[in-house]
Amino acid sequence: MSQTEDRLRALGLTLPVPTAPVANYVPFVRTGNHVHISGQLSNDANGGIKGTLGVDVTLEQGVEAARLCAINLLAQMKAAADGDLDNVVRVIKLNAFVQAGPEFYNIPQVINGCSDLMVAALGDAGKHARSAVGMYKIPLGFAVEIDALIEVSDRR
């Protein structure tokens, strides 16, 4: 078991099977040591968190939605890193999108739900640059979508 998975277990988290794409794209693309992970939605086995922040989704629910995205990103990272999260050298950047109502401006606070989990799971390797943007609509009505650029160690 990897150190990262030990940290996840200590947090009470088990990674899901990575979700399959819902359209014409792949879950991630690896080029050299960089992996671009497609946007992961705020979904889980219970249906996830859908809706619009500031309308029918609270800030606290939004933070949890971003955390769900982080869990789904970690599942894709594990697949991209040859099945071992300890092969993740660095989360380089997160691009985060929040389905936000017209008067909702706490977008960075929402995305902290993802950022905080990346650091808790990966330590210093989880510290990243990011963009956090409010959107009119997110696919399938989900509240949050986040994609990532990561660096992984050389394949053995």
Image: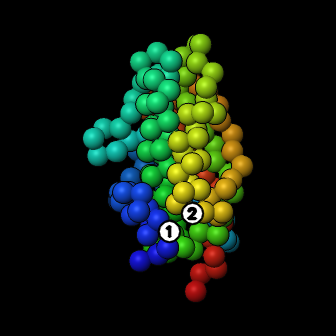
Under mark 2, the amino acid is Leu
Q: Nearer the viewer, residue 8 or 23?
A: 8
Residue 122 is labelled as: 2
Secondary element at tag 2: helix
Q: Specify the quadrant of the image occupied by residue 102.
A: top right
Relative to 107, residue 47 above or below: below
Give the labeled residue for mark 1.
4
Residue 95 falls in image quadrant: top right
Q: Which residue is outermost to the right?
A: 129
Question: Amino acid under label 1?
Answer: Thr
Extreme left residue here? 46
Q: Which mark is residue 95?
A: none
Can residue 35 be seen in the rendering of this structure? no
The extreme bottom residue here reads 156
Compared with residue 132, is residue 85 higher up or lower down, i.e. above or below? Answer: below
Q: Position of residue 71 (x, y in %)?
A: 45, 52
Q: Identify the residue shown where x is 45% and y is 37%.
A: 65
Residue 57, visible in the rendered structure: yes
Left or right? Give the position of 89 relative to 37: right
Assess whether mark 1 and mark 2 are in contact (beta carbons under 8 angstroms): yes
Q: Which quadrant would the C terminus be assigned to in this image?
A: bottom right
* Quarter of the rendering occupied by the N terminus: bottom left
Q: Position of residue 143 (x, y in %)?
A: 46, 30
Q: Position of residue 57 (x, y in %)?
A: 43, 23
Please give the name of the residue rendered at 62% of the width and 59% of the height, measured from the top-left corner: 126
**Residue appearing at x 50%, y 23% in the figure:** 53
Q: Going 54% across and 73% down the picture, which residue do you hit?
A: 86
- How many numbered marks appear? 2
Question: For residue 97, which quarter of the picture?
Answer: top right
